[in-house]
């Protein structure tokens, strides 16, 4: 059975998951959901990984669900489970979008910390056009990214919107010419690697907790992150005018 994703890792602790069904617009089937979930869980626990990049092979990032290839009632990881694993991934995540980023593919993209898109990329939430209302899980991710007002328009209409519109709505963080992709992604990766890894994981947890509206946990005040080994190293590196041990320039 052909693998639907590729997982790569370089010497700078950057892992890349590549959606690898270009002949199907990288649409996801049950096999891809299972493989994505397994890769995300494994990479999250891998201390040698500090940044995750999600990309698509070929013309499109991801054109959504492969309606003819998902299967009916089969056992396996659900789209919601895979998206939760991506949304709660413990390290910084970057989604790189070219071509179509549609439906569940858009949900994947907005579950990443940063969405970077080529200027020619396009986005849509077309579920109503095949008689399906986006699930509560997908709707939550879409509303968080684009706000209720824009989700009302694009969820109800199924219209495509451009990378420029995605940037204006706050769905995308950057939109750029296709030839700039690698250099822009490399600069962002370098910025992520300059941050302390354990502190980055804590910040991701804190952002998610604050966004949920839940009260701050009492134990948070006792964690003493300012007295952690990373904090001590960071202060020492600043005073000694050197790079901290967690950062190795590319």
Image: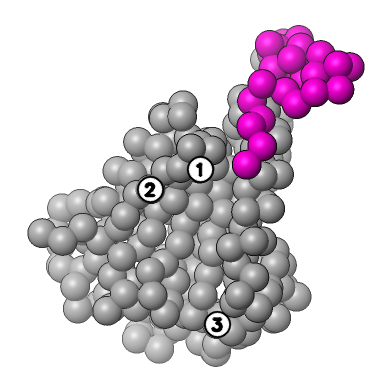
Q: What sort of colour scheme is used for the picture?
A: one colour
Residue at image position (66%, 37%) is 249
Q: Disc 3, disc 1: CB below 8 Å?
A: no
Mark 3 or mark 1: name the one nearer the start of the chain.
Answer: 1
The N terminus appears in which quarter of the rendering? bottom left
Mark 2 residue element: strand
- Residue 74 coordinates in the image, percent (x, y): 14, 59
Between 16 and 94, the one lying in front of the other is 16
Residue 48 in the magenta stretch? The answer is no
The residue beneath circle 2 is 8
Asked which quadrant contains residue 175, the reply is bottom right
Asked which quadrant contains residue 148, the reply is bottom right
Taking 135 as reference, is 239 left or right? right
Mark 2 or mark 1: name the one nearer the start of the chain.
Answer: 2
* Residue 161 seen by the camera: yes
Q: Dot 1: within a 10 Å radius of its alpha carbon, few (fewer than 14), some, or many (20 or more) residues?
A: some
Q: Disc 2, disc 3: CB below 8 Å?
A: no
Asked which quadrant contains residue 5, the reply is bottom left
Please report the bounds of the magenta region as a residue range: 221-250
Residue 14: numbered disc = 1
The C terminus appears in which quarter of the rendering? top right
Tell me if residue 228 comes above or below residue 95 in the rendering: above
- Residue 210 coordinates in the image, percent (x, y): 70, 39
- Residue 107 coordinates in the image, percent (x, y): 49, 64
The residue beneath circle 3 is 122
Gap between marks 2 and 1 measured at Cα: 8 Å
């Amino acid at each position: 059975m052909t693998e639907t994703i590729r997982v790569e890792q370089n010497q700078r602790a950057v892992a890349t998951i590549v959606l690898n069904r270009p002949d199907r617009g990288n649409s996801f089937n049950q096999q891809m959901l299972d493989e994505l979930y397994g890769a995300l869980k494994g990479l999250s626990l891998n201390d040698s990984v500090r940044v995750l990049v999600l990309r698509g092979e070929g013309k499109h990032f991801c054109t959504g669900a492969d309606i003819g290839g998902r299967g009916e009632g089969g056992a396996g990881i659900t789209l919601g489970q895979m998206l939760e694993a991506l949304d709660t991934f413990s390290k910084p995540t970057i989604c790189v979008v070219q071509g179509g980023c549609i439906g569940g593919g858009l949900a994947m993209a907005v579950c990443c910390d940063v969405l970077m898109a080529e200027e020619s990329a396009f986005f849509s939430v077309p579920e109503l056009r095949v008689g399906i209302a986006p699930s509560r899980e997908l709707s939550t991710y879409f509303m968080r990214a684009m706000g209720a007002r824009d989700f009302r328009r694009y969820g109800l209409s199924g219209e495509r919107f451009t990378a420029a519109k995605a940037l204006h709505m706050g769905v995308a963080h950057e939109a750029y010419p296709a030839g700039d992709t690698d250099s822009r992604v490399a600069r962002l990766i370098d910025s992520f690697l300059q941050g302390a890894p354990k502190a980055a994981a804590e910040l991701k947890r804190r952002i998610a907790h604050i966004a949920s509206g839940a009260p701050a946990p009492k134990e948070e005040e006792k964690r003493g992150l300012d007295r952690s080994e990373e904090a001590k190293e960071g202060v020492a590196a600043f005073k000694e005018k050197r790079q901290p041990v967690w950062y190795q320039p590319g």
